Amino acid sequence: MEDQDPHGMAAQQAAAKEYQPDLPNYLVGDKMPSSAITEEYAKADATYVEKTIALPGQYSHYRPVQGDGNCGWRGKFDPSKTFSRRSIGFAYFEKLIEAGGAQIESECNRLIGMNSMLTDIGGYAFELYEDWADDFISCLREVGSHAGTPMAHALLFQKWNDGPATAGYIYYMRLLAATYLKANADTYDPFIADSAGIHGYCQHSIEMVNREIEHLGITALVNVLLKPVNMVLEIAYLDRSPGSQVNKYRLPEEANNLSESSLGPIIYLLYRPDHYDILYREPQPLSIQVHRVNSVSDNAGIAPIHEDPNAFGAMDLASLAMIPGFTESMPIRPSNVGHQGKMPQHDPWVQSFAMPVSTPTPPMVAPPSNPSLSPHSAMGPSQPPPPPSEASSGMMTAAPECTIRFSALQYQYDGGNSGPVEPFQVTTSTFKNSVWNRAHFGNPDFHPEEWSPEDENMDGRLGVAKRRGSKRD
Amino acid sequence: MNAMAEENANAAPAIPASKQGNNTRPGPDSQSVTKRLQTELMQLMMSPAPGVSAFPTSDDNMLSWTATIEGPEDTPYTGLTMKLAFEFPSNYPYAPPTVLFKTPIYHPNVDFSGRICLDILKDKWTAAYNTQTVLLSLQSLLGEPNNSSPLNGEAAELWDNDPAEFQRKVTARHKDIDDE
């Protein structure tokens, strides 16, 4: 009976089993500017915003590598949940290609030589791993035969996006790492809490297909795969920890204290909880070099978006100019330096716009008997965006009898009082529901309202005051 | 430890369903599965382990095998031969095979449909296991049941408290089946 119920437990379980998350159709994605990450986090926590803004200055490009946090809760097998190894493996191939064909050939020979170690120390039967080892090495060799041509990278990209094949590459990397840990059991046993020791850890963590890499696994992989070819792994941790930049950590450990120029090829990974992408530093102009050498922790000056003087000019000025008469006082004109060329066209336009608007205004103004409300209540949907609310109330006490609201004089007064930067702070419901509100979907510069702690405090204070008032009543 | 074992017991009846789910994942193609299984078959024939064997059920389907386990000495299963069915998923060896006892068997970790509760066939599976290691694990499970997570509670109880009755039930339930 219960089975018939479409909303029953059985039906939901069936639906959960059928469910496939929407995954990107790549395993290893295209290289792109790392400013894409900054955009992705623009709406996130302030710590993330700050760190991602600094990121493009440190790493110019990144390559997304597929992550999948969805398989764990169902215990469902998923070969793709190995993206950290995928990232390391792909980047390792990439660095070898850059090193050239000779290096690749010697690396192939080194890996073939490790087979006996897999059997003797790892305890894996040759029949078990021979296909994985063969596939990995022949892929490396094939890619290497095109080293020095763009073909090599294209082929690499294609190979590492072939799901069945990469499952094998990655499992081979697991076996290499596990073998390394077993070979150095004395060193690593103390890190394993449970009594099974390093062999148990290999069996229950490294060899498990759907288990994400842990620090020990990364250490082993670096030592067995990267260190012998003089490669260094640098992981940038993008998390909520305090600081204005991502924390960086290098493996092997001794590379942390060395300057970048004294190290071999460096593989950069970006860690976000449960996810590793590949980062790149493209050959940079000299200024970046200087930053690198001086200090790794302070190059925020390279890309501080909000300090760009043109940013405000380009964005706010157009809308400010909508306010008739505003340009006369124009205290922000200096910030418009970058757009000097456009100014001559601006002024006449504003002038001509100001005329028709200011003429029909008087009839719409509320009677002077209610001066404190007049700027707000008269605000129809067709009105231009009003000035800041605090400013306008201050203006009312200064000139309560004025009938023409948007005079140059008022705005001059305004400009002296408060910064011109926030022209849209009026909070009447009429304005809020009009297209002039940027939070209105019809506004050409539509931008949803954002919560900020200051607003909260102000509202809170108002609320308290109101409540107090009503109590007295 | 106990909690994990319980989880296994609960998950057991869902095996056939989860097997279908595996097929929808991007996984190794059937060609590489076939290659891997041929390697395993070769290994089983070249260096057979005592008391276990396995072979594809039919010529045209490499993904379906029939295996046999001989009951280990000094256990209630001594002298009995059990047949099992292996179904390999399309992403084998990155996912475990589905294994069922075809021969009726009375065992704490096997239910009356032949479904098995063994961690390496579930969440402890690794691609480093193969058919032979699974068979050897099952063989040792016959002599050392995991009574903390029984599928057959009565059998677990009798194993601990009444070996004679346990032996009687094993013998009564066992029935040799014909080759299919």
Image (cartoon, coloured by chain):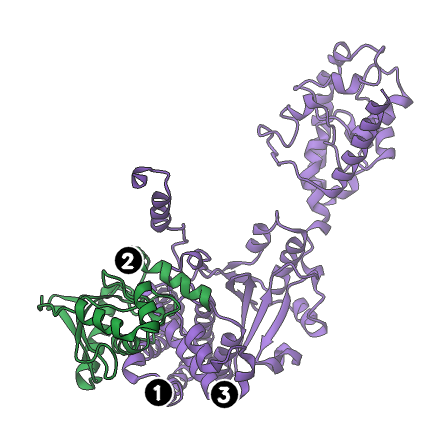
Chain colours: A purple, B green
Mark 2: secondary structure: helix
> Residue beneath label 1, please?
A119
Q: Amino acid at mark 1?
A: Thr
Residue A334 visible in the displayed image: yes
Picture quadrant of residue A260: bottom right
Residue A371, placed above or below residue A52: above
Mark 1: secondary structure: helix
Q: In this image, B155 relative to A85: left or right?
A: left
Pointer 3 with pointer 1, Cβ within 8 A: no
Q: Amino acid at mark 3?
A: Asn
| Residue A344 vs residue A169, the one in the foreground | A169
Q: Amino acid at mark 2?
A: Asn
Say few, some or many: other residues with alpha carbon within 10 Å of mark 1 (under 14 / 14 to 19 / 20 or more): some
Chain letter of mark 3 equals A
> Residue beneath label 2, please?
B23
> Residue beneath label 3, please?
A184
Asked if labels 3 and 1 share a chain, the reply is yes
Residue B76, placed above or below residue A387: below
Cα distance between the residues tagged 1 and 2? 31 Å
